[in-house]
Amino acid sequence: MAGCSSHVVSAYEDAYTYLHHPAVIIGGLFALVALILSLFLILQHLRFYTNPAEQKWIVSIVFMVPVYATESVISLWNPRFSLACDILRSCYEAFALYSFGRYLIACIGGETRVIQLLENESRKRLGKLLLERGEGEGGGEEEEEEEIHQKSFCNFFFRPYLLGKDLLTIEKFGLVQYMILKTLCAFLALLLEVFGVYGDGEFKWYYGYPYITVVMNFSQMWALYCLVHFYNATHERLRPIKPLAKFISFKAIVFATWWQGVGIALLCAYGVLPKHGKMQTALQDFFICIEMAIAAVAHVFVFSAEPYHFLPVSENRKGMISAETTKATLKVEQSNEEKPAMVEKTETQVEAPGTSIKESVQDIVVEGGHRVLEDVVLTINQAIGPMEKGVTKI
């Protein structure tokens, strides 16, 4: 039996050695395509940095593709770097999810505008709900309103539109907690690996991998759930930016790659795929290299820099003004007769002057970093607050 087992392991080693070099070359080519397309798109945004509130987060989101592609091809080339690459990839993945949430807020007009929107929607829905209850039961309006507000926890799951500005707080908390937990778990995995008790891909009770996987799975699904609720409450205002395409393209990278890694680990655990450490990580890295090339192509269209090439006419400073006239022929009924009518529509655009890439990068690093730090501190305080109250009561 031991001889048979060693023969199988030797066969897997030979298969890995035979396939490794072609996989590195193919994966490297796909990673190169992803790098070229993503860096070109990022440079376009930096060159026409006309809307910093939105574009700083777009650059952070798009930069996830080069990070994933580079770390995956390095890990594929040399498996000894796989854990370090996975930690860096995990940390940036969490930051990218946070950036996507901030991008949606920026597209609406900032936090103040989002709060106004959510509060107006809450009052409108609450009034409609109270009116329906009043017609059906005839109860006191103030008592019913108080009863609805007391069920805030249930409202988040069933009627999130009643939460108003609290929905924004929950959404931010969900994204930041994932960013914090993802980073902590990544470094905890490194620490456990140093002591030999991490067991990457091993679903055994004496390894740390299954416990970290459960925690990260819950945290990730909670962050996604909060983001979906926020999107449902604000999708009408987000319609001009076509948010569904952006949401799907981003979700495919963050969540599909995570579940892909868990799926490969499960298939290896049940013997469907070879239970060989190098083979398992190599499969994940190879697939990610291919997926990042596809994601880079999608980002060129979904997060295009073209909308930022032009400014509103009111903001014209040095840009070149261009007018585009669209003509269309319509048929109009007049005295029971159809007569052709010409309709003209003229759109005036101001071509934005190029901006300094150095200044754009500086704004992304300084302003973006300041915003992240503020949200992290706020989230930690929100988490510690209830604990302090509990300790005080005890």
Image: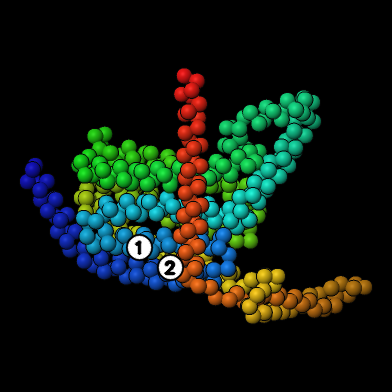
Q: Earlier in the sequence, mark 1 or mark 2?
A: 2
Task: Single out the residue that lies furthest toward the top.
Answer: 394
> Is any atom of residue 321 visible in this view?
yes
- Closer to us: 393 or 158: 393
Specify the amino acid type for callout 2. Answer: Ser
Identified at 23% across, 62% down, the residue is: 77
Identified at 62% across, 73% down, the residue is: 310
Q: What element carries label 2?
A: helix
Marker disc for residue 38:
2
Neighbourhood count class around disc 2 (C-alpha, 10 Å): few under 14, some 14–19, many 20 upward: many
Give the quadrant of the N terminus. Answer: top left
- In this image, 58 relative to 93: left or right? right
Give x and y (percent) for residue 83.
27, 51
Residues at circles 1 and 2 in contact by the CB criterion of under 8 Å: yes
Specify the amino acid type for callout 1. Answer: Ala
Q: How far apart are the alpha carbons under marks 1 and 2?
A: 10 Å
Q: Mark 1 points at which residue?
A: 69
